[in-house]
Amino acid sequence: MRGRERLHELVDRFPRCRVLVYGDLVLDRFILGSPKRISREAPVLILRFEEQRDVPGGGANAMANILTLGGQAMAVGVVGDDEEGKVLRQALDALGGDVSRVVVAPGLRTVTKVRILAGGPSALKHQVARYDIEDQVGDGELKEALMRALDEVAPWVHAVAVSDYGYGAVFAQGVQALRSQLGGGVPVVADSRFALPSLGPVDGATPNLEELSAHAGHFPQTDREVAEAAENLRRKLRARFVVATRGSQGLTLVERAQPPFHLPVFGTDQVADVTGAGDTVLATLTLALAAGGTPKEAAVLANLAGGIVVMKAGTATVSAEELHRAVDMAPFIHD
């Protein structure tokens, strides 16, 4: 089967694929306003409030992308018994996601990233401030509840996306217990902000250049340097592959017993917003593997999806229709 046709077929299989998202579930809250005046109390801008937008972020954004791409998704993570946790679960439920295994923790504050954006009525709004509401998932009952949830969902899934933002819902015991229950036929792909090697062996990983440099001890710049750093990380993780996302330079795939595979960025390198782009890459890559794609085919689709989402403002998702169009348009896919 030829290149574009094969990729279209994989996207068409997405609705039959069941993906578990195990990770830190975040609410991204956007407060939009228009400039009013400079405050007399302090040299700060006063905004006239216009609207509030709440969208899934972090691991929840990865789940949202799986759902908008047509896949089936279940979440295992933790939210608080607060308004933000309720809003986040409702948003995922409205997209068709299964949040029945999300642990609701009394007294815990749902991780919420609040971005304040300002701009005129006909202008693109820009972020002027941000504050984060952060609580950690500690040891004890919450982690035991997560382990039970992972045990319950293991027979259900074709692939697992692990989204670790460092808030404690993802931990090595959970990842490895899940992986042992799944066996070797279900891929586990991890994206971890701080602790990728400590999660233990995984099948694949999607570090960005900053994360890759933390493991390499230097910042890789050329194709060769990125490939070498990614291969060293792959061996450390005992993984089948590593996809290094490189922003305006596309991505690099290293795979066991295969030469490095470099893909240029899809679209333009003049991006609108990179918020959540890594979540989109993780979601698309994992969903494509669940559909039976090879790491190379999955990396191509993930690269296309990442190129689409960075042209959208805020935390955004990609649809199957957009991905089909990108497959037809991408100059680096050969028929």
Image: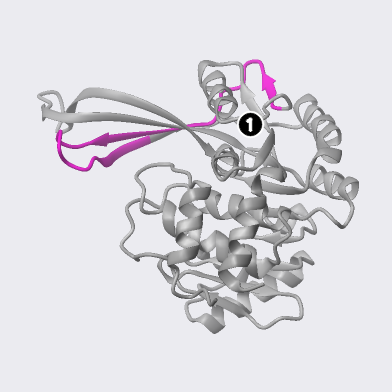
- Based on the picture, tell me whether residue 105 belongs to the magenta stretch: yes
Give the residue displayed 61% in from the left and 30% down from the top: 96
Residue 5: within the magenta?
Answer: no
Quarter that holds the N terminus: bottom right
Q: Is residue 245 positioned above or below 164 on the image?
A: below
Residue 333 visible (yes or no)? yes
Q: Estimate the x, y position of residue 65 in percent, counting from the top left.
A: 55, 43
Residue type at mark 1 is Gly
User: Relative to the observer, which residue lies in front, 21 or 319?
Assistant: 319
Question: Is the C terminus in the top left, top right, bottom left or bottom right quadrant?
Answer: bottom right
Image point (60%, 63%), residue name: 7
- Nearer-the-camera pick, 10 or 259: 10
Q: Is residue 224 left or right of residue 168?
A: left
- State the residue at coordinates (77%, 58%): 202
Stretch of the chain drawn in magenta: 102-130
Residue 134 is situated, as x and y percent measured from the top left of the image, at: 53, 31
Front position in the image: 181 or 215: 181
Crowd band around label 1 with a 10 angstrom C-alpha radius: few (<14), some (14–19), many (20+):
many
Corner quadrant of residue 259? bottom right
Q: Position of residue 104 (x, y in %)?
A: 67, 20
The colour style of the image is one colour
Callout 1 secondary element: loop
On screen, residue 156 versus residue 311, left or right, reads right
In the figure, 95 relative to 308: above or below?
above
State the residue position of label 1.
Answer: 97
User: Residue 310: where, in percent of width, then height?
Assistant: 40, 54
Whether residue 240 sits left or right of residue 313 in the image: it is right
